[in-house]
Image: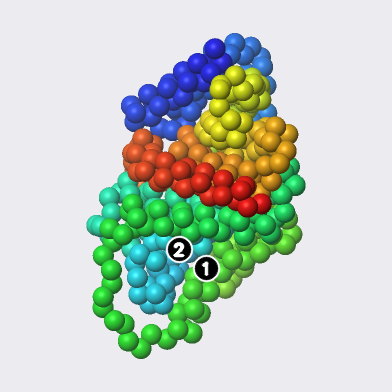
Amino acid sequence: MEMLKLVAIFIGIMIFIKLKKPLYFSILIGAIISIILFKIPISTSFNLTKKALTSAETINLVLAFYTITFVQRMMEKRKHIFLAEKSLDNIFNSKRINIMLAPFVIGLLPSAGAVLIAAPIVKNAAEDNLSVEEQAFVTSYYRHISEAFLPTYSSILLALELSKVDMTKFVVGMLPMVAVLFVLGYIFYVKKIPKITEKKINVNLKKEIKNLIISLWPIAVTIIIVLSLKITVYKAVIPVIIVSAFINRFKIKELLPMFKSAFETKLIGSTVAIMIFKELLTDTGVVGRLPGYFEMLPIPSTVIFVIIFLVSTLITGSQATIALALPLAFATIPNGGLSLMILLMCMMYIGMQISPTHICLAIVVEHFGISFIDLIKKTIPVFFSFIIICSLYSYLLFLFE
């Protein structure tokens, strides 16, 4: 019955998304359906909502998004995004490389707002060769590849800690899958962009590299601060904003409007709604009981946990899935090792690309003015292709471990 309830909740969310209701509204409907179906007392619902609103995770996420958006406004004002795109174009002379590499590099910044920095570069490189829906997919997809394997993200660090898998082995083991992700995006969409045949002369490589540094140093410095000092994103971004204001000689009258424009009401509303929804579902305990339901199926344990990771990621996102399901997976399959870790992290990554609880998808949908369903349609071919390839790869790793 609980599985049917989960299905009903997500059908409800998808119906309202299909009716072109804002994502925050659709997610809140899902939260209300959860309260009704799981018979969560009103008082408990209010307490859980309060907990979600006041949690450090929610506050840090909102502040990270706000500060990153502020940096984006500053970069746009000084045309640094355009400068970065132009430098990449001069160095590689390929819009195809621009459209893949720029979001990936920007995605090294562990913040939801980073996807908005990549969006203008993708739009300019794609021009009319990709539809708006395809541009949205490419922006989100390549921006998130680093989340699949780099220990700059809390979800990867948590998974490595819980599984006790060696960090270096994991990162190296994931590199072939990173290459696969780049290739799949290229095959399905990026190759639609024509090759550049015009030869550029007198390209000053040192100058272009310098321009890249000038353009992207706020992102690089933020990443360095986050990794070295182990602090939350917004605390790392604030000093970057201050330094950038001095270096780029911003006037007070230029900065004041940014304090308002950096506050994206719909996007922050979606963030808060998702956190409330996750808190309600987590409280029901249904995610923790998923392994028991799947164990009744006549299929191998590895396949069971692949399904659990995909379903749980769709419901609660990556961190909750790792915290609840990863220890169960390694307890059930004690000899899983690196191959199991890679398989489950791949499933988590690709599951997040179609999860309505993924905040970055809400940001992309709002920014490009498309529906969530439109984005998912463009993701599905890559979704199934990657599942097949990473399953074969992890099996080969298991055989040779």
Residue 113, x across and y down, in percent: 52, 51
Quarter in which the N terminus is drawn: top right
Against 88, is 159 above or below?
above
In the image shown, does 4 or 24 lie closer to the viewer?
4
* Relative horizontal placement of residue 124, taking residue 285 as reference (left or right): left
Residue 360, x across and y down, in percent: 49, 44
> Quick one: label 1, few (<14), some, or many (20+) residues within 10 Å?
some
The disc label shown at residue 102, or none: 2
Q: CA distance from mark 1 to mark 2?
A: 10 Å
Q: Is residue 202 in view from this perspective?
A: yes
In the image shown, does 276 or 171 lie closer to the viewer?
171
* Relative horizontal placement of residue 194, taking residue 227 as reference (left or right): left
Element marked by disc 2? helix
Residue 233, x across and y down, in percent: 64, 53
Residue 257, x across and y down, in percent: 48, 54
Task: Indicate which disc, 1 or 2, sits on the residue closer to the N terminus.
Answer: 2
Which dot, 1 or 2, sits closer to the camera?
A: 2
Against 238, is 365 above or below?
above
Q: Is residue 349 in view from this perspective?
A: no
- At 42% across and 41% down in the image, what residue appears? 384
Which amino acid is tagged 2? Ala
- At 56% across and 63% down in the image, what residue appears? 219
Residue occupying the far front of the picture: 399
Which amino acid is tagged 1? Leu
Coloring scheme used: rainbow
Residue to which mark 1 is pinned: 216
Element marked by disc 1? helix
